[in-house]
Image (tube, grey):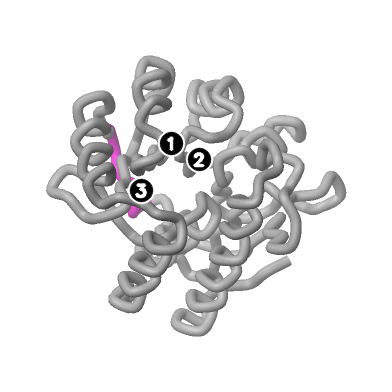
Amino acid sequence: MSFDIDWWWPLQEEINLEFGFSKCREDVSSRLITRLYKSKGKLTDLVLNRKVTIIGAGINDDDLIVGDVLIAADGAVSACLKRDIIPDIVVTDLDGNLTDIALANKHGSKVVVHAHGDNLSRLFEFSDKIQSTCLTTTYPTSNTDCWGGFTDGDRALMMSLSLGAKVVTLVGFDFQKIGKYSGNFSINKIKKLSWANKIVAQCQEKSGKVQIY
């Protein structure tokens, strides 16, 4: 059964309003990413009917990382590498540790690169350092995928459900504080965690496939 994301679009509009995101910049980012990056490969066979674990940036040193398919949300790739784990997939808007993302990519991680209106400069900066498997954008285009989601973690969740994951376990998802792999503190990051919490709850309710540890 497919994961319907029709419910997502009203939330996207609320997010745009709260954070002042411009649809014009989203359009620019969509065109830019397809010029700078070339997607090679597909994720469906890797995720379909599999037990997926998504590692969030709030992961602690004593949290276990286990699962059939491991997906690191952006900066959480650093937590994986510290344990000598190469995640199967990294979902990133290029806000995490580029060196670690590139290293994981070199050793086999498939990288999902997301373009949005606020990461235009990073799209330029990192285009020659990462081999992308999949390109995503805030709104659907003919050349990119779009499964919904706002932060890298809940975007990875919506992607996994849309690709037919059997069950999705979330590790290191702390919606109350900025995780050690999230980068510097900011008020906007706290607001984004609140939205991530809401999105994950919706995914739990609508899919019945989400577990949080």
Instruction: Classify mark 1: residues with Cα within 10 Å, few (<14), some (14-19) or many (20+).
Output: many
Q: Are the residues flagged by discs 1 and 3 in contact, CB closer than 8 Å? A: no
Q: What is the magenta range?
A: 40-45
Which residue is denoted by mark 2 in the rendering? 90
Q: Position of residue 147 (x, y in %)?
A: 33, 60
| CA gap, disc 1 and disc 2 | 5 Å
Residue mark closest to the camera, 1 vs 3: 1
At 61% across and 34% down in the image, what residue appears?
86
Seen from this angle, which residue lies furthest top?
Answer: 128
Instruction: Classify mark 3: residues with Cα within 10 Å, few (<14), some (14-19) or many (20+).
Output: some
Question: Magenta segment, principal secondary structure?
Answer: loop
| CA gap, disc 2 and disc 3 | 11 Å
Q: As shown in the figure, which amino acid type bears the numbered disc 2?
A: Val
Q: Earlier in the sequence, mark 1 or mark 2?
A: 2
Q: Position of residue 101 (x, y in %)?
A: 54, 28
Which residue is denoted by mark 3 in the rendering? 43
Q: As shown in the figure, which amino acid type bears the numbered disc 3?
A: Leu
Residue mark closest to the camera, 2 vs 3: 2
Which quadrant of the view contains residue 123?
top left
Which residue is denoted by mark 1 in the rendering? 111
Q: As shown in the figure, which amino acid type bears the numbered disc 1?
A: Val
Does dot 1 land on a helix, a strand or a loop? strand
